[in-house]
């Protein structure tokens, strides 16, 4: 199990739940990031915050604090081997 903020660029994961509660959890739930949602990490901002993710046909920016509140499991590794996830077969 990982946090969404730890998923490598191009990684695809599924939301399992939340690592914290409160306003951050409420915000991501209101965005539609609910358990069972499949999320693809698209790209980071130049300074690494916010990060861009795609789910339910939308591309959304999440602050690292928000992404750190979401527990996920990997569905598939990133799209190229940079040694970041250990799942590439290239």
Image (cartoon, rainbow, N blue to C red):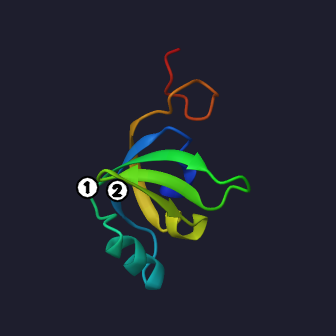
Q: For mark 2, give the secondary structure.
A: strand
The answer to whether mark 2 and mark 1 are in CB contact below 8 A is yes
Which numbered disc, 2 or 1, marks the residue that appears first in the sequence? Answer: 2
Count neighbours of disc 2 (C-alpha within 10 A) and say few if under 14, some if 14 to 19, many if 20 or more: many
Q: Quadrant of residue 83?
A: top right
Visible in this render: residue 2? Answer: no
Asked whether, in this view, residue 47 is left or right of residue 8, the answer is: right
Q: Position of residue 34 (x, y in %)?
A: 29, 65
Q: Position of residue 50 (x, y in %)?
A: 60, 61
Work out which residue is located at the far left of the displayed protein and give it: 36
Q: Which residue is mark 1?
A: 36
Q: Which residue is mark 2?
A: 15
- Identified at 41% across, 50% down, the residue is 54
Count neighbours of disc 1 (C-alpha within 10 A) and say few if under 14, some if 14 to 19, many if 20 or more: few
Asked whether, in this view, residue 48 is left or right of residue 86, the answer is: right
Q: For mark 1, give the secondary structure.
A: loop
Q: How many marks?
A: 2
């Amino acid at each position: 199990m990982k946090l969404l903020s730890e998923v490598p660029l191009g990684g695809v994961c599924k939301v399992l739940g939340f690592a914290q509660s409160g306003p951050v959890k409420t915000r991501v739930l209101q965005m539609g990031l609910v358990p069972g949602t499949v999320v693809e990490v698209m790209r980071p901002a130049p300074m690494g915050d916010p990060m861009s993710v795609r789910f339910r046909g939308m591309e959304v920016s999440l602050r690292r604090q928000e992404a750190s509140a979401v527990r996920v499991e990997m569905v598939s590794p990133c799209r190229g081997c940079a040694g970041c996830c250990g799942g590439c077969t290239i």
